[in-house]
Image: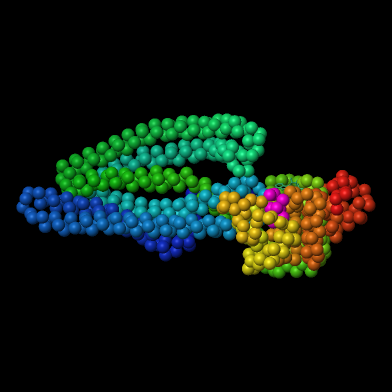
Amino acid sequence: MMNKKYGFFILAGRSIGMYFRAAKWFGILEQTLAILHSFSWAIGIVATQLLFDAAFRASGGNESFWYIAAPLLILAIVAIAQQVLNGAENFIANEVSYKNQGQFMAKLQRKLQRVPAQNFENTAFLDDVNKAREGAAEVAELAWISLQFFTFYVVFFATVGVYLFLLSPMLLIVLFISFIPAIIGQYFHVKIFTKLEEENAPMRRRYEYYQKAIADREFYKETRILGAFRYFHALFSQTMLVVTKKIWRTERKMAVIMLLLNVATFIGLGISTYLLFTNTMTGIISIGAFAAVFAALNHIFGIMDELLIWNLGGITKNIGKAANYMRVMDMEEVDGADGTPDFSKGIVAENISFSYPGREECAVKNLSLTINPRETIAIVGENGAGKSTLVRILTGIYRPDSGTVTIGGLNSTKTQPNAIFNGISGVFQRYQRYKMTLAENVAISDTAITQNNTEINNAISYAEFNEDNANLETMLSPEFDGIDLSGGQWQRLAIARGLYRKNNFIVLDEPTAAIDPIEEARIYNQFKQLAKDKCAVVVTHRLGSAKLADRIVVMDNGVIVGLGTHSELISKDGKYADMWTAQVTWYENRS
Ligand code: ATP
């Protein structure tokens, strides 16, 4: 799924297209400034030559100061123009870069909304998404550097090159040759550091994980009570040591290579200076040209270094992240027709099968089920039976690999997911604890309507949420000076959130593990009253809750092994009757 490869030029070309689409006129302005800025350097060298030549001619004492005033003024104007262009270009480049990064990130977020939801169950995909997020900045950087290559560096080296060629073709050739060690150095730099990064990345992930295990909120209680601090600390130190040793060895190797190459560059620079000198002595070039080129040599090498080490070096190191971004952007999307579900048509699944990415066996196998209008269905079964998977297919979150699901009259494979979600509400095992106020934690489920406090209060009382220390405005996060809730209260709040959303089909996928069986049955009883005019599905391990449903689906290994009312199912031998016998004591003497 995620192994599409991209060449450097494809990535650069696409990023340039994205750059102009996002930055528009600002992009054109930035690149025009880059061209002018680049030109100004060549003009600066010519202006320096003019000034030195004039000064040389005036040096006999025959001319007044005014003889050099004109070239001095030209040089001053060029120097000021250089500074202004540099400042303006940097300013606009920063603006464009922030704007582009933001837009590329927003594009990625929109894209992630449209890729098939089951991808989010795949850790390889999630890794790629993480890298793609960093890639948004890299794409902006790649576009910028690729454009700068033409609008600044090519213009700079071409104009300076023409000037040098006119002075002395040999000088140009020697200077060009002296760049070669720097290019070779860059090649080694990229190669060696890419290898280092590849070797170190898994190690780094590991020590970051150990660091989390020592101090993160979700880990520290367990780490302390298990006395595992020393254990994780030792693992952390060992891994860190391996990583730093590798970095040290690589840096040392690179330093030796760079030293040798720098010596070669230095020799090239020496030969260039010698050529300049002999050409001046033999009168081929003027004193002014000698001074101008001599003064510019450092700068020419500096710009070459900037191009090779900072710009191309930086981008080749991070090109993988830009590729990740493009790969995610190119993923197939779930698409389909628009529509409005009509739940008086119920939900019909016919011969559906589904398997998770990378798994061969089906989580749901050739299953058919009809949820009638105004019917509440309970789904029960052992861990891994396929209950949650079925719920995700019945709500249109996943599309089945084969078979069809018709949700309120809409075929889930042929309809836009967002059209189906209109009118569906759901509470899942792994619900969110938003770091927001109590009211926002409930109303987030239906942001299309204005927050209605009466309805929020109704929802929280149906879900039996009662926390003396909290009102609707209480912030539910200690990090933001608020309070935290117990696990059971959070679950009730998640249920309230599900109830608040306007819906005609509601699903509770076992959000009640922290609530005791009797309490759960009571909440589900209220839920049943609320859902009496809707389609509803509850997934539960507790049969005291399941028995409240109109019909119960018993699942095992991805298929339905029992279907009927509570009394029908306990009257037959089978999984349900066995589960009931095992659980019945939970409910005795308590209801
Ligand atoms: P539980 O009662 O534990 O929540 P469940 O009945 O809801 O279980 P599912 O979560 O639907 O069962 O899982 C059904 C099958 O699909 C299991 O074999 C499980 O291992 C597999 N499965 C579930 N999630 C994934 C996933 N993200 N990637 C791969 N396989 C998965």
Q: Residue at x 94, y 52 (%)?
A: 571
Nearer-the-camera pick, 137 or 529: 529
* Residue 229 higher or lower than 53, as above or below: above
Magenta range is 486-495
* Residue 61 higher or lower than 425, as above or below: above
Residue most extreme to the left = 62
**Residue 369, percent across and down?**
82, 58
Q: Is residue 426 left or right of residue 10?
A: right
Q: Is residue 26 magenta?
A: no
Q: Residue at x 7, y 49 (%)?
A: 60
Q: Main secondary structure of the magenta part?
A: helix
Nearer-the-camera pick, 432 or 369: 432
Nearer-the-camera pick, 207 or 213: 213
**Residue 451, percent across and down?**
64, 66
Quadrant hosting residue 180: top left
**Residue 256, percent across and down?**
39, 31
Q: Is residue 489 magenta?
A: yes
Is residue 395 something one can see in this rendering? no
Q: Is residue 190 left or right of residue 270?
A: right
Q: Is residue 470 left or right of residue 92?
A: right
Q: Is residue 541 left or right of residue 247?
A: right
Q: Residue at x 22, y 48 (%)?
A: 292
**Residue 408, percent across and down?**
76, 66
Quadrant hosting residue 393: bottom right
Q: Residue at x 43, y 34 (%)?
A: 251
